[in-house]
Image (spheres, helix red, strand yellow):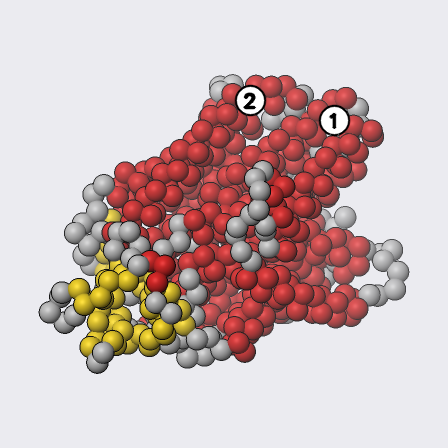
Amino acid sequence: MTTASADWFGHPRQLARLFTTEMWERFGFYGMRALLTLYLTKHFLFNDRTASGIYGGTAAMVYLTPVIGGLLADRYLGSKRSVKFGALVMAAGYFLLCFGGEPVQPWANIDGVRHTVVQENVVDRPSASGRERRYVVLDSQKLLIHGEADGSISLLAPDGHVARHVAASGFEPGGDRSPLITAVILLALAMITIGNGFFKPNIATMVGELYGPDDPRKDAGFTIFYMGINLGALLSQILCPLLADVIGWWAGFLVAAIGMLLSWAGLQFDGGRLAAFGNPPADRGKDRSLLIYIVALVTVPVVMLLFENLMNATPEATGTGIIAYILALSLMGKLLFGTFLIAVPVILVYAWRNGSRAEFQMMVAAMILITFNTVFWTLFEQAGTSLTLFADRNTDLSVFGLFSLSAAQTQFFNALFIVTLAPVLVVVWGWLRRRGLEPSIPVKFAIGIAGVGVGFLFLVWGTAFADATFKVSVWWLAGMYLLQTLAELCISPVGLSMITKLSLARIVALMMGVWYLSIAVAEYVGGVIAQIASVDTVGGQVTNPKLSLDTYVHVFTVIGWVSVAIGAVLLLLAWPIKKLMHGVT
């Protein structure tokens, strides 16, 4: 182990290089994330269900691929080469997102007959002006499309009277998408997930190498490093949507790609500062790096097929129960759920056979908390899907009448609150610890799960004050993000630490993989939940804002109370779980 010298705020000077590398990588990723759902629904005119499924699948793969990427780095590549390769692959994916082609032209099938949808005041940008109108032409009349509360459609004549009423089952909106352009977008998302698998686990490994085994600065060093994550997210979630609105979608994704290239350059041109860190293992044998790179790129089409299957999967299940539900999932869903349901009991059996009674009980506690962690991230990760669409459709985004945010920019609230509140919460936990009052890990998890539900219920409360256009003030959305960020800070910082403390020493890395797998499952299920909040649109615009608001209120109310209830259950289980942890805090 080579320990770096301390000359950057009391930490190794190499930490500054890794801090900026991570900051720019997160800048690219969160910039893309802020735009993705709106890009799919407004530019490509995918319906909410398909867009939420693609987003959830992308997020799931982002957490699944690091399990393999970390293993390859440990055995063959070394962290540094893995990070650089991953950065280049991700940058290529962001660049490909720039090539979305012309906006898709909408159409509507009315009682089986296709009609072209005529658009007025529509600009191909993330933000809507509120002046957009969509019409169909019937019998030489241009009729305004208006959705009704029961899901049916009224076609309004210029004088406002209903020229024709169409049942919900008789109206099907859509758009003609180029199969080639669609394939390019799926290729881009596949490259982003594969590249992330090489980058995500290994940049943190390099940070750990900067410190000796007993270096007391390590925790503080990781805290500084993680600030880079949120700083990058904060900057990109403001800048990328802004450029997408002012210039075009391609500009937002291009800046994300540039951020990714800056991340790569930070390691490629490090001036030898990181020469002693992140290198391949000395006993790796023959250099297999080129073969690994080729296999990784060959895997990209396989991930594309998973995305395509996800888009075409039908949500209906035959029969009831968990088995029927899993059988009805897409291939990606089956892969995630199957792996998780197999991994948990197999690892517990291994711990029972190879560990002491106390070690087995600690592993049981870890698995219980990992399962509850899945619940938290399932609900928390509505930010990129249903909450972004809610911000676009049912939120007044004006800030004190001075300027307006875009729907994509509302995601920056989370990063802003983490940057400002994380140090405060550290002080609070320390103050409670010195007085013997700090909550245990299970209690923190319970608070976090209940807290994310309270955030949704706060937003639901705000919808009671919606204006005449069925929009709520952006401050209700900001308040929800504040509550959910506090909830996140009760779970996210302690989760990985909990895994290292409770796992058998021989399988810590495997347990880390299960932790990431649980989040991957959560991201996928989060996409499924967002699909429940789907609202019918024509040309990317809702036809009835009141119906849209009612739909979101119903879904947010249900998941809010369910989250609070699950948090309460975990709170009741906190004492027996703590007993299984045998003093681990």
Provide the residue designation for mark 1: 360
Q: Residue at x 47, y 34 (%)?
A: 449
Vertical relation: 111 (above or below) 247: above
Q: Is residue 279 visible?
A: no
Mark 1 is on which residue type?
Answer: Phe
Could you say which is closer to the camera, residue 183 or residue 87? 183
Describe residue 409's horizontal placement relative to residue 58 as left or right.
left
Mark 2 is on which residue type?
Answer: Leu
Could you say which is closer to the camera, residue 554 or residue 489? 554
Q: Is residue 283 visible?
A: yes
Vertical relation: 487 (above or below) 2: above
Q: Residue at x 61, y 46 (%)?
A: 326
Question: Horizontal and vertical percent for residue 242?
Answer: 35, 66
Describe residue 252's horizontal placement relative to residue 213 as left or right.
left
Q: Residue at x 44, y 34 (%)?
A: 562
Describe residue 400's horizontal placement relative to residue 533 as left or right.
left
Question: Horizontal and vertical percent for residue 116?
Answer: 33, 77
Q: Quadrant of residue 147?
A: bottom left
Q: Earlier in the sequence, mark 2 or mark 1?
A: 1
Counting every numbered tag in the picture gives: 2
Could you say which is closer to the camera, residue 197 or residue 300? 300
Question: Horizontal and vertical percent for residue 445?
Answer: 52, 32
Rounded to the nearest angstrom, the CA distance separating label 2 from label 1 is 18 Å
Q: Are marks 2 and 1 in contact (CB under 8 Å)?
A: no
The C terminus appears in which quarter of the rendering? top right
Secondary structure type for disc 2: helix
Provide the residue designation for mark 2: 573
Secondary structure type for disc 1: helix
Q: Quadrant of residue 145?
A: bottom left
Q: Residue at x 52, y 50 (%)?
A: 316
